[in-house]
Image (cartoon, helix red, strand yellow):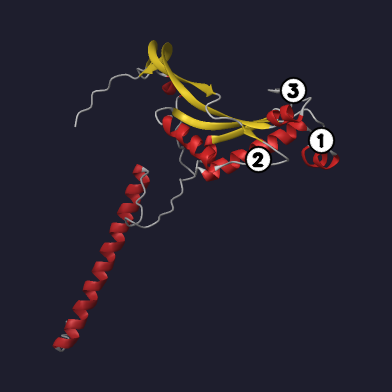
Amino acid sequence: MMETISCTPIVLLKFLLKRSVAILCLCIVMSANAKAASGLETGVRETGAPGKATEMHLPADQPFTPWIHDPSIFEEDEGDRTEMREVVKQEAKTIKLENLVPPIHFGLGEAEITDNYLKLLSDVLDSMHDRANVRLHFVGHTDSLPLRRGLIEQYGDNVGLSRARAGAVAEYCQRALNLPPESISYEGLGDSRPVASNATEEGRQLNRRVEVQVWYDEIIEKQVEKEVIVPREVNRVK
């Protein structure tokens, strides 16, 4: 004889809620087992949620195939070719102009560079505005008298003395005319190129000088044959 259990509505509601939770948990476990079994069959593992870092190891019991590059792929001809063509080549030839301005003469160890001389240099540079890479080159010269002990310790010989004088004049003119440093150069030749006899004081004073040369580059264009790379034509579709 079955015994009838009487219960209140609240007790019955709790009983049904517990049964629903148990059935839902059982469904979740069965679904997870099914996904795991599917992953083992296909060898594919599900990663984490998108946007999150995921670490995954290869299964130790399954062989894997390494991916390598075939070197012959890079040896294939991409369609570029080389051929000899006539091209225009530019060469710069330095032209040196002398005696455009008189030399600067040294008296007793120093030289006087007047404003008129600076104006003369400036006018020469203005007249060369249509030339390429115009610059001033200063060349120092001395007489043939040997240097005294103090000068030997400072300059070494007449070549060193002439170089120092040319450098001093070059630096002064560069600053006075506000020229870029790369447009100025100098050298010293000592007593190797006299313009007068060193037997007299007048001749020696003429030999103690700094000459100013104006240099510029003459651009020469000529046709030359050169091997060039001709790229293949590629049709691009937007």
- Which residue lies under the disc numbered 2? 111
Please tell me whether mark 2 or mark 3 is closer to you in this view.
3
Judge from the rendering whether residue 219 lies leftward or rightward of residue 13; answer left or right: right
Left or right: residue 30 versus residue 15 is right
Relative vertical location of residue 35 with respect to residue 170 in this rendering, above or below: below
Residue 58: x and y in percent read: 46, 45
**Sequence order check, earlier mark of 1 and 3:** 1
Along the viewing direction, whichever of 174 and 110 lies nearer the viewer: 110
Find residue 185 and report its image quarter. top right
* Coordinates of residue 15 in the picture (x, y in percent): 21, 80
Instruction: Name the disc covering residue 147, or none.
Output: 1
Which mark is drawn over residue 26?
none
The earlier-in-sequence mark between 2 and 3 is 2
Q: Looking at this rendering, what residue extends furthest in the left direction?
A: 9
Look at 51% across and 32% down and name the residue there: 135
Q: Is residue 56 above or below residue 98?
A: below
Q: Nearer the viewer, residue 235 or 65?
A: 235
Residue at (80% x, 36% y) in the render = 156
- The residue shown at (36%, 49%) is 45
**If the image is split into quadrants, where does the N terminus sit?**
bottom left
User: Outermost residue, right direction?
Assistant: 149
| Residue 197's disc number | 3
x and y, in percent, of residue 194 in the image: 71, 23
Amino acid under disc 3:
Ser
Identify the amino acid type marked 2.
Answer: Ala
Q: Earlier in the sequence, mark 1 or mark 2?
A: 2
The relative height of residue 38 versus residue 230 in the rendered view (above or below) is below
Report how far apart the C-alphas of labels 1 and 3 lie in the structure.
Answer: 18 Å
- Image quadrant in which you'd find residue 207: top right
Disc 2 + disc 3, Cβ < 8 Å:
no
Can you see residue 153? yes
